[in-house]
């Protein structure tokens, strides 16, 4: 699933379906499977390290798949431009699985990472919220620039009038709304 033409997986046909606050016992398309949360995406050292959490049906095994995208989706949830692989997690008696997964190889920082969860009945979730992957040499300016490059230009302003919308403009806008 690439970036661009709307939400990559839309279970209800109505945009992002919120996760359940507790154990995932919905009825509906794909049992309205909760999406995982990606908490960290670190590329500073090899292998790259990702952490997160899934809240779903208790005592159940799920296949999680990580994705990397060059662009963010306006919904705030990811897309599936490049698969980073899949792995299994099992939720505890409370329906929670905390996870850590590593991926070998060079991965470019500043990209957008998201994930899906697939249950034993092949019920796949929508994409998780995306986060920006950090990495070797990535400065706060580069992180802000990656975000700025993916927001609508009408939301960006060249505050310091240097003909470039950059981190300096964001800081200025925050400090002087």
Image (spheres, grey):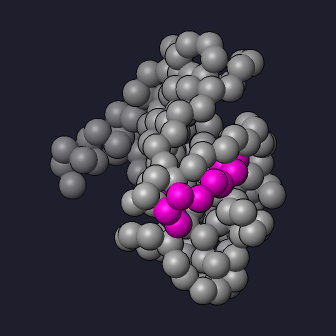
Q: Is residue 11 above or below residue 78?
A: below
Is residue 114 visible in the rendered structure shown here? no
x and y, in percent, of residue 108 in the image: 66, 26
Q: Which residues are magenta?
A: 55-65
Q: Position of residue 160 (x, y in %)?
A: 34, 38
In magenta stretch: residue 61: yes
Quarter of the view holding residue 70:
top right
Residue at figure coordinates x 73%, y 42% from the top left: 86
**Residue sitting nearer the eye, 97 or 37:** 97
Considering depth in this image, is 18 or 15 the residue closer to the camera?
18
At x 71%, y 20%, the residue is: 104
Foreground pick, 15 / 11: 11
Give the percent coordinates (x, y) of residue 107.
Answer: 69, 24
Tell me, yes or no, whether the highlighted magenta stretch contains residue 14: no
The quadrant of the picture occupied by the C terminus is: bottom left
Query: In the image shown, does 176 or 102 lie closer to the viewer?
Result: 102
Image quadrant occupied by the N terminus: bottom right
Q: Residue at x 62, y 26 (%)?
A: 102
């Amino acid at each position: 699933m690439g970036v661009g033409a709307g939400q990559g997986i839309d279970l209800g046909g109505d945009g992002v379906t919120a996760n359940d606050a507790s154990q995932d016992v919905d009825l509906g398309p794909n049992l309205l499977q909760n999406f995982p949360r990606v908490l960290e995406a670190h590329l500073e050292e090899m292998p790259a390290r990702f952490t997160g959490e899934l809240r779903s049906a208790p005592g159940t095994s799920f296949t999680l798949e990580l994705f990397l995208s060059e662009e963010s989706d306006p919904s705030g949830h990811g897309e599936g431009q490049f698969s980073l692989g899949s792995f299994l997690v099992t939720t505890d008696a409370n329906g929670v699985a905390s996870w850590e997964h590593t991926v070998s190889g060079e991965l470019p920082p500043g990209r957008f990472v998201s994930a899906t969860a697939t249950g034993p009945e092949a019920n796949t979730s929508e994409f998780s919220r995306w986060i920006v992957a950090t990495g070797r040499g990535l400065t706060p300016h580069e992180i802000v620039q990656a975000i700025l490059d993916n927001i609508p230009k009408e939301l960006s302003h060249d505050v310091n009038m240097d003909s470039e919308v950059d981190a300096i403009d964001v800081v200025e806008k925050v400090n002087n709304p």
